[in-house]
Image (spheres, rainbow, N blue to C red):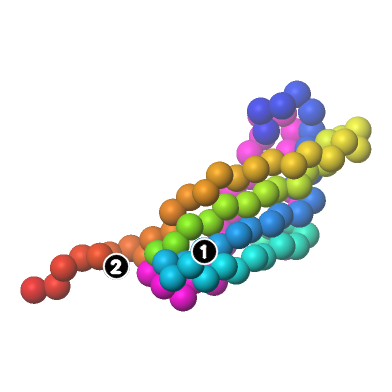
Amino acid sequence: NLSEKTVQLMSRYWKIIDANGRVEEVSGDGVVGQQPVLGTGAEFTYTSGCPLSTSSGIMQGLYFMKTDDGTLLRVEIPAFSLDLPNAYETVN
């Protein structure tokens, strides 16, 4: 949290696109069953998975946050690559 306000992660939205162009959308409350509250300078780390029928794809999304004074914020997560480790290694 790089702001000067305490924020709470209320919900998220993800758009997942596999290598064949198939789109899956996922949304819901919080992340991994939690709605963390982050004070100034705090961070929250989590591990999660997503549906993907190919060995690569892209994912982008939004976090919806609420400040301690009730202001709602929309935080965009830019597209990033999803790649299965070692999926492109050559086998001899």
Give the label, 1 or 2, closer to the camera: 1
Could you say whether the residue bearing mark 2 is in a helix, strand or loop?
Answer: loop
In the rendered image, which quarter contains the C terminus?
Answer: bottom left
Q: Residue 5, image x and y in percent?
A: 79, 28
- Give the residue at x 42% y 67%: 19
Task: Residue 4: give x, y in percent of width and height.
Answer: 75, 24
The residues tagged by marks 1 and 2 sit, at their Cα atoms, a distance apart of: 17 Å
In the rendered image, is residue 37 in sight? no
Q: Label 1's element? A: strand
Q: Is residue 61 above or below residue 8?
A: below
Q: Which mark is residue 50?
A: none
Can you name the residue that lies furthest to the right here? 69
Of all residues shown, which one is farthest toward the left? 92
Query: What residue sits 87% from the left and 36% below the top?
Result: 71
Q: Residues within 10 Å of mark 1 (few under 14, many from 20)?
A: many
Hey, what amino acid is under mark 2? Ala
Q: Is residue 40 magenta?
A: yes
Please state the horizontal and vertical placement of residue 7, each as a whole percent of the image.
78, 38
Q: Main secondary structure of the magenta part?
A: loop
Q: Quadrant of residue 76?
A: top right
Q: Quadrant of residue 46?
A: bottom right
Question: Which labelled disc corresponds to residue 17?
Answer: 1
Amino acid type at image mark 1: Ile
> Picture coordinates of residue 59 (x, y %)?
53, 56
Disc count in the image?
Answer: 2
Which stretch appears magenta?
33-55
- As drawn, the residue found furthest toward the front would be 21
Can residue 78 be seen here? The reply is: yes
Residue 87 disc label: 2
Q: Is residue 54 above or below residue 66?
A: below
Q: Quadrant of the N terminus?
A: top right
